[in-house]
Image (cartoon, rainbow, N blue to C red):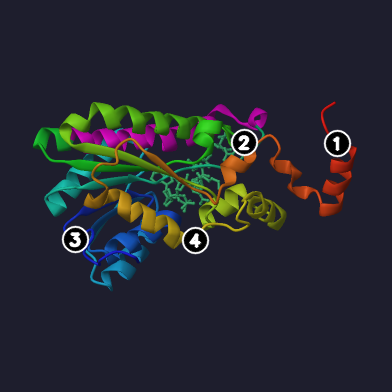
C-alpha cells in the first residue's frame, strides 16, 4: 500500500458483497489501513470466513446475512451497523448480479434478478444510510462500483448495463442533492478484474477469458490491489473534494472499443506498407 497505515483509522465502512471477490479485497485493504468493517451478503459462510481472516489481523468486523433486494431487511441491518459501531462513515455498494446471455433468452425473472440486486439494492442501501446520516447531522461517503458499459451500454449483459447506468445516474444525482448534508458520492468503473463470481458467469470458457484480456490495450487484466488502492483513496478524507466523479480503471479497454479504427491493430508492418502504397502520394 502506498498510504500511511492510519489512512482510514476511525472509519466504519460497510461493504455489500464484502465476503468475496473485489468486495473481499477492499475489506482487506481498508482493514489494513485502520478501518472497521461491516460486511454483508446473502451467504453467511463466506462472510464468516472473511471475518475470521480479518479478525486475525486485528480488524473489527461486523457481518450480517442480507439480501439487498429486501428493503426492510436493509433498514434493519443498517440500523444494527449504526448501533454496533455507533456510526457509519462509508457505504460501498459493491454487491452485484450478472451473467452473459442473449437478451431475447431472458425471462422476466432473470431481468428482475439483476435489476433488483444492482439498481434497487444499491438504491435501498444508499437511502437507508443517507437518511440516517441526514437525521444525525453526520457526514458520509458512498462509493459505487459500476462498470464502463454503464455509459456505453453492452449487448449480452443488458440487465446489468441498464442497472449500472441507473447506478451512475444515482451517483451523479445524489452527489449534487446530498452535498448540502456533507454526503459525498464517488464511483469506480472497473474493467476486467479476475474474480470467481464474475469469471464463472461472464467468461465461463478459457477462450472468452483470453478474448477479454486481448481487448485491453495494456494486454492484461487488473490486479485487485490496483483497484483497492484507488478505492481507499476515494473513500479517505484526502479525496474530500471529489464528489460525483466516476474513475475508470480498465487499462484503456472501453476507449479501445469506442474508437472506430482501433481494430486496425491486427495489420502487420508489411500490410501498412501496402496500404500506404495504394494511397494518393500528394494532392493534385
Ligand atoms: C439465463 C439465467 C441465468 C443465466 C439465472 N437465470 N442465470 N437466465 N442465463 N446464466 C435466470 C433463472 O433461470 C431465473 O429465471 C432467474 O434468472 C433468477 O435466477 P435465480 O438463480 O433464482 O436468481 P438468484 O438466486 O436471485 O441469483 C441471481 C443471479 C446469480 C444474478 C442470477 O447469478 C447471482 O447470484 N449472482 C451474484 C454474483 C454475480 O453475479 N457476480 C458477478 C458480478 S460481475 P426463471 O424465469 O427461470 O425463474 C459484474 C460486472 C462484470 O457485475 C463486468 C465485466 C468483467
Ligand atoms: P462477486 O465476487 O460475485 O461479487 C458480488 C458480491 O455481491 C458477492 O459477494 C455476492 O455475495 C454479493 N451479492 C450478490 N447478490 C446479492 C444480494 N442480493 N444481496 C447481497 N449481496 C449480494 O464479483 P466481483 O467481480 O467481485 O464484483 C464486485 C463488483 O465489481 C460488482 O459490482 C461488479 O459489477 C463490479 N465489477 C466487477 C468486474 C470484474 O471484472 N470482476 C468488472 C466490472 C465491475 P452473495 O452471493 O453471498 O450474496
Which comes before the other along the chain, label 2 or label 4? 4
Query: Which residue is labeled 3 in the image?
Result: 9
Q: Nearer the viewer, residue 70 or 210?
A: 210
Quadrant of the image for the C terminus?
top right
Residue for point 65% across, 49% down: 215
Residue 69 lies left or right of residue 180; in this view the side is right
Mark 2 vs mark 4: give the one in front. 2
Query: Which residue is labeled 1 in the image?
Result: 281
Query: Which residue is labeled 4 in the image?
Result: 223
Residue 209 lies left or right of residue 246; in this view the side is right
Residue 277 percent location from the top left of the image: 89, 42
Which comes before the other along the chain, label 1 or label 3? 3
Which comes before the other along the chain, label 1 or label 2? 2
Residue 268 percent location from the top left of the image: 82, 52
Q: Is residue 203 above or below residue 128?
A: below
Q: Nearer the viewer, residue 205 or 183?
A: 183
Q: Residues within 10 Å of mark 4 (few under 14, many from 20)?
A: few
Mark 3 vs mark 2: give the one in front. 2
Secondary structure category for the residue under label 3: loop
Q: Which mark is residue 258?
A: 2
Residue for point 26% across, 64% down: 33
Residue 110 percent location from the top left of the image: 55, 34
Secondary structure category for the residue under label 4: loop
Q: Is residue 129 magenta?
A: yes
Residue for point 25% across, 47% down: 90
Q: Residues in magenta?
A: 103-131
Amino acid at each position: 500500500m502506498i498510504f500511511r497505515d492510519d489512512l482510514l483509522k476511525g472509519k466504519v465502512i460497510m461493504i455489500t458483497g464484502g465476503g468475496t471477490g473485489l468486495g473481499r479485497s477492499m475489506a482487506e485493504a481498508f482493514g489494513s489501513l485502520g478501518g472497521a468493517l461491516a460486511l454483508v451478503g446473502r451467504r453467511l459462510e463466506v462472510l464468516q470466513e472473511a471475518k475470521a481472516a480479518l479478525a486475525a489481523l486485528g480488524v473489527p468486523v461486523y457481518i450480517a446475512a442480507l439480501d439487498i433486494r429486501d428493503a426492510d431487511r436493509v433498514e434493519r441491518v443498517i440500523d444494527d451497523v449504526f448501533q454496533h459501531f455507533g456510526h457509519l462513515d462509508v457505504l460501498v455498494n459493491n454487491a452485484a448480479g450478472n451473467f452473459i446471455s442473449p437478451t431475447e433468452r431472458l425471462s422476466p425473472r432473470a431481468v428482475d434478478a439483476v435489476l433488483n440486486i444492482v439498481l434497487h439494492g444499491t438504491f435501498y442501501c444508499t437511502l437507508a444510510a443517507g437518511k440516517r446520516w441526514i437525521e444525525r447531522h453526520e457526514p458520509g461517503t458512498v462509493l459505487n462500483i459500476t462498470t464502463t458499459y454503464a455509459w456505453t451500454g453492452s449487448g449480452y449483459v443488458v440487465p446489468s448495463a441498464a442497472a449500472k447506468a441507473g447506478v451512475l445516474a444515482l451517483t451523479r444525482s445524489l452527489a449534487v442533492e446530498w452535498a448540502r448534508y456533507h454526503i459525498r458520492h464517488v464511483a469506480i468503473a472497473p474493467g476486467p478484474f479476475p474474480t470467481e463470481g464474475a469469471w464463472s458467469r461472464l467468461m465461463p470458457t478459457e477462450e472468452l477469458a483470453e478474448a477479454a484480456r486481448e481487448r485491453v490495450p495494456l494486454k492484461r487484466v487488473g490486479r485487485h490491489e490496483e483497484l483497492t488502492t484507488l478505492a481507499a483513496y476515494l473513500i479517505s478524507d484526502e479525496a474530500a473534494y471529489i464528489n460525483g466523479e466516476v474513475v475508470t480503471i480498465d487499462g484503456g479497454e472501453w476507449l479501445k472499443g469506442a474508437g472506430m479504427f482501433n481494430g486496425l491493430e491486427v495489420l502487420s508492418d508489411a500490410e501498412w506498407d501496402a496500404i500506404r502504397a495504394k494511397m494518393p502520394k500528394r494532392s493534385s
